[in-house]
């Protein structure tokens, strides 16, 4: 029986807590940690849990009665907390994004290697049937070599969203929609296609004049072999219609699921390849559903890795790859030029301070509140979440 602590009891912690509670025979939540003790107490009361209440993650150190810790704090604190816990011999699951900088990611990975403990980064959308199945179809080779990917990470957030004290600042949120919203879809792209060789990007703040950071970015990615991708990251799109599209040499597939295949006429113009479409549809429909989805699916995966001594699907290295691509988008957008990957350790943008020092302030943050809409439901995105 693994004993769990939750560090940070804000909105996203509920997804972790409810997921752990789905596995009562495998784990037990033992402690809530929050720098605002009242917030931890309220969260425990909301869920009817009798847990220890602490006000610092350091109070978990030196204890052998905590096995796994979920870190659900603002991004700027992820590295310090995770490294302390890993060095103390605890397994760690960190909410997205892994950290604002590659330097912090590397220190987290090194701490995990030294301790031999599991470090996993939340990318719960991989554990949705439409995304997992899309990956499986890609891996089947049926669509041929991928030549183009289109990532539409479309979200919408109201003006007051950035009034929360840590949001809207490069120094505390680490970035805008590219880092904190599109991280889900950029993770999917990296998982399915790997890292590009070159990135160009445009960044802007079109609707939130109470934030320093971008609320939309558009990036163009160059891969080897002539392959390209485009990534739109936004919190200004009504309807939050998100999609991941892969154009292969033989067919097009996507989440939400859609398939279209073409072959060439003698004159080079397209004609529909219904036989391949039927084959792809049959393959897709024959894939087994996931036993657990979303955060619950990822927590099941992390628990299994700890129980068996295995490796979770989403490792520290996976989280780092996503941050490297996001860092490249920021560098390209800030400097208004095409940049090459990988990002070197002596690069200005390798550290969080380097990024903050070079980031544009689209606006200055004008309001700061401790809490926003406490107890209200939050959305975790994906218009494909309930579709096979």
Image: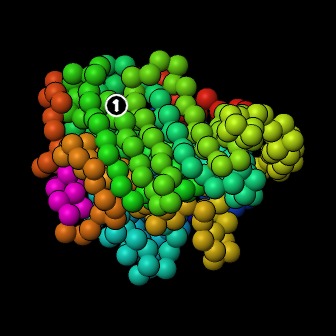
> For mark 1, does the 10 Å Cα neighbourhood hold few (<14), some (14 to 19), or many (20 or more) residues?
many
On the rendered structure, is 165 left or right of 150?
Answer: left
Count of picture labels: 1
- 48 vs 107, nearest the viewer: 107
- Which quadrant is the N terminus positioned in? bottom right
Residue 40 percent coordinates (x, y): 42, 42
| Above-or-below relation of 189 to 225 | above
The secondary structure type at the circle numbered 1 is strand
Q: Which residues are magenta?
A: 347-355
Residue in the picture at 39% in, 22% down: 236
Residue 351 part of the magenta-drawn span? yes
- Which quadrant is the C terminus positioned in? top right
Residue 100 percent coordinates (x, y): 30, 52
Residue in the picture at 44% in, 45% down: 183
Q: Quadrant of residue 348?
A: bottom left
Residue in the picture at 34% in, 61% down: 341
Q: Which residue is mark 1?
A: 216
On the rendered structure, is 206 left or right of 222?
Answer: left
Residue 388 visible to an observer of this rendering: no
| Above-or-below relation of 148 to 367 | below
Residue 246 visible to an observer of this rendering: yes
Q: Quadrant of residue 313?
A: bottom right
State whether the magenta stretch is mostly helix, strand or loop.
helix
On the rendered structure, is 349 left or right of 184?
Answer: left
- 106 vs 362, nearest the viewer: 362
């Amino acid at each position: 029986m693994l004993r769990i602590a939750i560090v940070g009891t804000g909105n996203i912690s509920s997804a972790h807590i409810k997921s752990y509670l789905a596995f009562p025979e495998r784990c037990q939540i033992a402690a809530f940690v929050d720098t605002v003790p009242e917030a931890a107490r309220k969260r425990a009361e909301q869920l009817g849990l009798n847990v220890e209440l602490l006000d610092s993650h350091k109070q978990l150190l030196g204890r052998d009665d905590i096995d796994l810790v979920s870190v659900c704090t603002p991004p700027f604190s992820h590295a310090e907390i995770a490294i302390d816990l890993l060095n103390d011999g605890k397994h760690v699951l960190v909410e997205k994004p892994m950290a604002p900088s590659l330097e912090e990611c590397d220190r987290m990975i090194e701490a995990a290697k030294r301790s031999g403990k599991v470090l996993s980064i939340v990318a719960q959308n991989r554990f949705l049937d439409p995304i997992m199945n899309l990956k499986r179809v890609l891996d089947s080779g049926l669509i041929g070599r991928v030549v183009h990917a289109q990532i539409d990470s479309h979200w919408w957030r109201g003006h007051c969203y950035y009034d929360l004290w840590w949001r809207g600042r490069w120094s505390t949120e680490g970035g805008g929609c590219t880092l904190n919203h599109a991280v889900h879809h950029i993770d999917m792209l990296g998982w399915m296609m790997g890292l590009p060789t070159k990135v160009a990007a445009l960044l802007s703040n079109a609707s939130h004049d109470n934030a320093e950071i971008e609320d939309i970015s558009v990036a163009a990615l160059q891969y080897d072999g002539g392959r390209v991708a485009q990534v739109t990251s936004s919190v200004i799109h009504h309807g939050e219609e998100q999609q991941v599209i892969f154009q292969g040499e033989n067919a097009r597939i996507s989440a939400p699921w859609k398939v279209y295949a073409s072959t060439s006429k003698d004159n080079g113009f397209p004609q529909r390849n219904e036989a391949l479409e039927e084959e792809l549809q049959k393959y897709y429909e024959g894939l087994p559903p996931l036993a657990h989805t979303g955060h619950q699916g990822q927590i099941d995966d992390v628990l299994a890795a700890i129980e068996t001594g295995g490796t979770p699907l989403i490792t520290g290295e996976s989280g780092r790859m996503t941050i490297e691509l996001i860092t490249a988008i920021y560098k390209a957008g800030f400097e208004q030029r095409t940049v090459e990957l990988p990002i070197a350790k002596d690069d200005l943008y390798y550290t969080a301070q380097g990024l903050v020092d070079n980031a544009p302030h689209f606006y200055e943050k004008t309001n700061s509140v401790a809490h926003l809409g406490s107890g209200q439901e939050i959305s975790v995105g994906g218009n494909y979440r309930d579709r096979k």
